[in-house]
Image: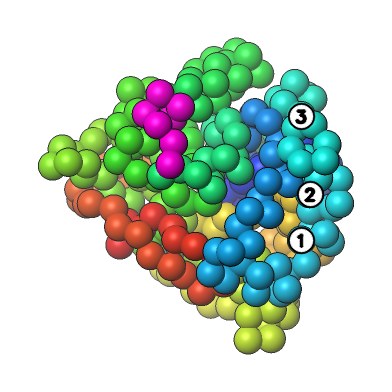
């Protein structure tokens, strides 16, 4: 049987205020549950412009049209406009996802700073980043988080070690094909990694002329029988300008009788299969600017 988990990354204030409600309506219509991962701290989206010199960034911008997907105001946060603290403006929308029966967990504190500057940040900065995200989650939901996924599928030895102290049920910090326990400096950690296994809409859209409908067809074709299938989406994209494409994707899952389950629901079964221990590497993937962490 083909099974999929929908990983919803919430990166921005706009994606929280408007994208969450939009996705909740779509998912409710299909009677499907997803896993929502929230960015809680400052929305510094405008600072992403420093990626202009990163290999593949300009090409991706040409293909996807960031102003259309993210909006002008979001692109000014942290540059010409003050960076708002997301959870203080969007706590109600975050809680609405849990109230609708979906899984809720952590995506991070400052998404852009982590994404762009991870390897330049000190251990104390990273510790504070995790602490602020977990404290905000506690403020919004009144309990400790059980799962977390990193921005842009990026991690390093320090983030994996820091995250270990939170005793999560799982994390999703990389791309790959199957769950595993990460090995850091010869030590096997206890936080299961659940990688994203499928390409994203923004990675394939416009690549070699691929249309949104063709991206859906491609992703459906990549679903594997009796295996981990994780599809990542963004409230800013699939909950915004490309909502129609995502609605069609959900209908396609239903028509193909693909089972949809949350990460939290799937993790006990994944752990029972005794996943291997594995070191992470870094690689570049088609349609994405820069590297991602990979679990093989």
Q: Is residue 173 left or right of residue 48?
A: left
- Tell me which secondary structure the magenta stretch mostly adopts: helix
Identify the element where label 1 is drawn.
helix
Picture layout, residue 130 above or below residue 248: above
**Is the residue under label 2 in contact with that under label 3 (CB below 8 Å)?**
no
Q: Residue 13: in sight, yes or no?
A: yes
The residues tagged by marks 3 and 1 sit, at their Cα atoms, a distance apart of 20 Å
Towards the viewer: 13 or 232: 13
Identify the element where label 3 is drawn.
loop
Q: Quadrant of residue 119?
A: top left
Residue 227 at x, y percent in the picture = 38, 61
The residues tagged by marks 3 and 2 sit, at their Cα atoms, a distance apart of 12 Å
Q: Residue at x 63, y 80 (%)?
A: 207
Residue 67 at x, y percent in the picture = 82, 59
Residue bearing the label numbered 3: 84
The residues tagged by marks 1 and 2 sit, at their Cα atoms, a distance apart of 8 Å
Q: Residues within 10 Å of mark 1 (few under 14, many from 20)?
A: some
**Is the residue under label 2 in contact with that under label 1 (CB below 8 Å)?**
yes
Q: Which mark is on residue 75?
A: 2
Residue bearing the label numbered 1: 66
Q: Residue at x 78, y 49 (%)?
A: 75
């Amino acid at each position: 049987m083909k099974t999929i988990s929908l990983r919803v990354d919430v990166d921005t204030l706009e994606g929280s205020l408007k994208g969450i409600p939009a996705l909740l309506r779509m998912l409710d219509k299909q009677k499907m549950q997803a896993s929502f991962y929230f960015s809680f701290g400052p929305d510094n989206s405008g600072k992403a412009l420093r990626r202009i010199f990163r290999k593949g960034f300009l090409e991706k911008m040409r293909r996807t049209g960031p102003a259309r997907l993210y909006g002008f105001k979001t692109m000014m946060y942290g540059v010409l406009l003050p960076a708002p603290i997301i959870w203080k403006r969007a706590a109600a929308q975050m809680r609405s996802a849990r109230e609708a029966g979906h899984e809720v967990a952590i995506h991070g504190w400052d998404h852009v700073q982590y994404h762009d500057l991870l390897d330049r940040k000190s251990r104390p900065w990273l510790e504070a980043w995790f602490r602020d995200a977990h404290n905000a989650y506690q403020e919004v939901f009144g309990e400790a988080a059980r799962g977390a996924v990193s921005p842009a599928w990026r991690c390093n030895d320090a983030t994996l070690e820091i995250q270990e102290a939170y005793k999560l049920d799982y994390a999703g910090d990389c791309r790959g094909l199957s769950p595993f326990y990460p090995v850091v400096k010869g030590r096997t950690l206890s936080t299961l990694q659940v990688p994203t296994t499928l390409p994203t809409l923004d990675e394939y859209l416009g690549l070699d002329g691929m249309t949104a409908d063709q991206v859906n067809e491609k992703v459906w074709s990549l679903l594997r029988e009796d295996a981990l299938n994780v599809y990542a989406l963004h409230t800013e994209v699939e909950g915004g300008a490309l909502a129609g494409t995502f609605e069609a994707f959900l209908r396609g899952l239903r028509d193909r009788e693909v089972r949809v389950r949350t990460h939290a629901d799937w993790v006990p079964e994944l752990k029972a299969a005794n996943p291997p221990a594995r070191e992470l590497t870094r690689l570049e993937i088609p349609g994405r600017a820069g590297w991602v962490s990979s679990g093989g």
